[in-house]
């Protein structure tokens, strides 16, 4: 924490700026057109979606005193919005319910109010913000190799304990640890981007309000194929067919989506290449993995299908790589589990004194054992999910569900 110890003291705000900022928050109910309300209804959710969410107990209800009520939310909502039927029944408990509508909070003060008052921040405030942003950049850079460092620790533990699999307690700890890491790095990256990147009409920090799914997936396909060709010394990796509307866009973090698709495509490419190699070298299965150029034309294509739904955007990745045995389906979400016998971090189990650094560690084609569990955490961070269905002997289908509604809550432990 050296950076935090050397951090400069917070400069005092001038009285005029302090008064303007406090006034912009307290005047949310005034007639000032330049003040923003503290909260506004979520425009992304329609009436039917709201009633469905309440019916499924996705949002809490409040009684007249502000306490929670465990009743039928959908019927209570209808009771509030229906006129009296004239029966004189005034004892219905639903008439006292108040719905807690999902809100979009606004945690910033409008700069327009300051400009109208001819008030500008002093240089000390700008310097303080630049110093704080620099601290966050150093912290983020310092923790870049955290994933590989923790993986090295797990490998060393497995070696000393002579364990082939990690236990449920370690699995749950790593899930909580990496999910918290995703959230922290998201907040740090958002602050850094807001203060260092040039303004763009489609970006708010690292969040793209109009993220083009086709372009992001296509870039991930090209990157995954490049890694595959480099790893297996191929001139042409298995073809990938992308079926996606070119105009499909929604608010998301492009880096998260690219990471998910990239990791899943690496798994599919490896499975297809190694299955074709096994069929070609059926007589000598222990021979080195060398695929002639004429055999590269026999690779079955990998299909990536993107579909837009009312609630989700679903990406399906289908391959013909032989699938996963049913006995191994319970292990695929386990950290450090891989079907690859060597490569990646598996080669490091017999090496002493190996350390990882963000600048010299090269992501392997496979064998890391982190692709699926980390991709599922990235998908779940914004209310999505990741599912895998395997047909042993044929191939695997992976479904990426991305929540397109803005009502998802951060799933931190």
Image: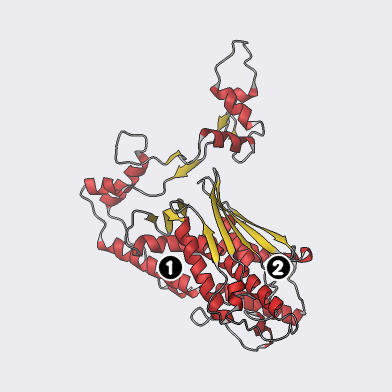
Classify mark 1: helix, strand or loop.
helix
Q: Is residue 182 above or below residue 344?
A: above
**Viewer-nearest residue: 288 or 376:** 288
In-front residue for pair 258/109? 258
* Comes first in the chain, label 1 or label 2: 1
Query: Mark 1 — residue?
Result: 136
Task: Say if residue 253 shows up in the picture.
Answer: no
Left or right relative to 40: residue 373: right
Please determine whether, in this image, residue 345 is positioned above or below residue 120: below
Q: Residue at x 60, y 70 (%)?
A: 269
Look at the numbered disc 2 and give the secondary structure of its residue.
loop
Which color scheme is applied? secondary structure
Which residue is situated farthest in the bottom direction here?
Answer: 352
Residue occupying image coordinates x 53% and y 79%:
235
Residue 211 placement: quadrant? bottom left
At horizontal 61% and vertical 30% (from top left) the residue drawn is: 74
Q: For residue 371, which numbered disc appears in the image?
A: none
Measured from the top left, where is residue 178 in percent x and y?
59, 65
Q: Which residue is mark 2?
A: 322
């Amino acid at each position: 924490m050296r950076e935090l110890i050397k951090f400069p003291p917070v400069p005092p705000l001038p009285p005029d700026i302090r008064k303007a900022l406090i006034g912009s928050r307290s005047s949310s109910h005034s007639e000032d057109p330049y003040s923003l309300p503290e909260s506004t209804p979520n425009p992304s959710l329609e009436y039917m979606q709201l009633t469905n969410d309440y019916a499924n107990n996705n949002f809490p209800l409040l009684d007249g005193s502000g306490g929670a009520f465990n009743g039928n939310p959908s019927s209570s909502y209808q009771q509030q919005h229906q006129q009296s039927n004239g029966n004189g029944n005034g004892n219905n408990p639903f008439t006292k319910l108040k719905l807690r509508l999902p809100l979009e909070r606004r945690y910033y003060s409008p700069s327009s109010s300051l400009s109208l008052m001819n008030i500008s921040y002093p240089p000390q405030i700008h310097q303080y913000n630049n110093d704080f942003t620099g601290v966050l950049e150093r912290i983020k850079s310092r923790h870049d190799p955290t994933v590989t460092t923790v993986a090295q620790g797990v490998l060393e533990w497995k070696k000393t304990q002579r364990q082939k699999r990690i236990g449920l307690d370690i699995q749950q700890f790593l899930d909580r640890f990496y999910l918290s890491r995703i959230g922290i790095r998201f907040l740090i990256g958002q602050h850094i981007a807001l203060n260092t990147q040039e303004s763009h009409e489609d970006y708010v920090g690292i969040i793209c309000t109009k993220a083009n799914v086709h372009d992001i997936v296509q870039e991930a396909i090209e990157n995954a194929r490049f890694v595959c060709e480099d790893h297996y010394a191929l001139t042409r990796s298995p073809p990938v067919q992308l079926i996606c509307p070119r105009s499909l866009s929604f608010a998301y973090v492009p880096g998260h989506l690219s990471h998910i698709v990239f990791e899943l495509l690496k798994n599919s490419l490896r499975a297809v290449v190694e299955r074709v190699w096994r069929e070609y070298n059926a007589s000598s299965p222990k021979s080195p993995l060398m695929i002639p150029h004429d055999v590269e034309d026999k690779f079955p294509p990998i299909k990536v299908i993107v579909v837009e739904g009312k609630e989700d955007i679903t990406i399906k990745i289908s391959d013909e790589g032989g699938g996963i045995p049913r006995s191994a389906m319970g292990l695929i979400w386990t950290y450090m589990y891989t079907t690859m016998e060597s490569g990646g971090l598996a080669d490091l189990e017999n090496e002493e004194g190996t350390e990882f650094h963000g600048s010299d560690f090269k992501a392997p084609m496979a064998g890391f054992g982190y692709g699926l569990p980390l991709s599922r955490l990235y998908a779940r961070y914004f209310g999505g999910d990741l599912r895998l269905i395997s047909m042993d002997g044929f191939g695997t289908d992976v479904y990426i569900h991305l929540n397109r509604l803005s009502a998802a809550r951060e799933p931190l432990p």
